[in-house]
Image (tube, helix red, strand yellow):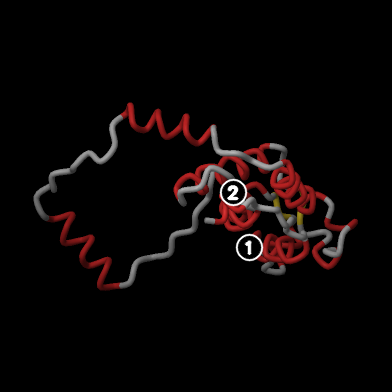
Amino acid sequence: MLKVLVDYPAPADELTVIERALAEPVVVERLLSIEDLAKLQVATRRVYVDPAVSRYALSIALATRQLAETELEELDGYVEYGASPRGPINLVLAARALALLRGRRYVLPHDVRELAKDVLRHRLVLSYEALAEGVDAERILDRVLETVPMPQLELSRQDVA
């Protein structure tokens, strides 16, 4: 669902990892039971997604497929295949989980925007031209997110508190 980029650790942190690998295994404390995980999965499915938020996720995916027809024509030729239909589906599903983690029962467009690169970066098939010119999925998605307008949702007073 996601491709999260994790850089190499700082040398001091890497040394700590080595030292821990040489030591006796630590006792792992279970923080979440299988039953609690199942309850969280059910709770995630109950998180409300406004149709405008779903349309926003779709607009982001469509922009990766239609660079020539948008304000992104400078990127035309760099993407062989844009995000498939599974891209916006997983973007909305991930946004639901993020909203729940943040204590909300509804998804905001900002949740979608925040997760867009993690969900979509591995779903773009770049052209040989992009690879030769050093254009990566990050650059393309940054431009897509700059260009696709984020919808403004009307929140009720009880949601704001």
Q: Report the residue at 46% width, 51% height from top.
A: 102
| Residue found at the very far left of the displayed protein | 24
Q: Quadrant of residue 10?
A: bottom left
Which numbered dot is residue 64?
Answer: none
In this rendering, the label closer to the viewer, 2 or 1? 2
On screen, residue 158 versus residue 151, left or right, reads: left
On screen, residue 18 versus residue 116, left or right, reads: left
Q: Report the residue at 76% width, 53% height from top.
A: 64
On screen, residue 64 versus residue 101, left or right, reads: right
Find numbered disc 1 in the image and state the secondary structure of the residue it sits on. Answer: helix
Residue assigned mark 1: 138
Residue assigned mark 2: 119
The local crowd at label 1, few if under 14, some if 14 to 19, many if 20 or more residues have their Cα within 10 Å, is: some
| Residue found at the very far right of the displayed protein | 69
Q: Is residue 62 above or below residue 13?
A: above
Query: In this view of the protein, can residue 125 be seen by the observer?
Result: yes
| Residue 140 position in % (x across, y down) | 71, 62
| Residue 82 position in % (x across, y down) | 74, 48
Q: CA distance from mark 2 to mark 1?
A: 11 Å
Q: Is residue 64 above or below residue 48?
A: below
Can you say which quadrant of the picture contains the N terminus? top right
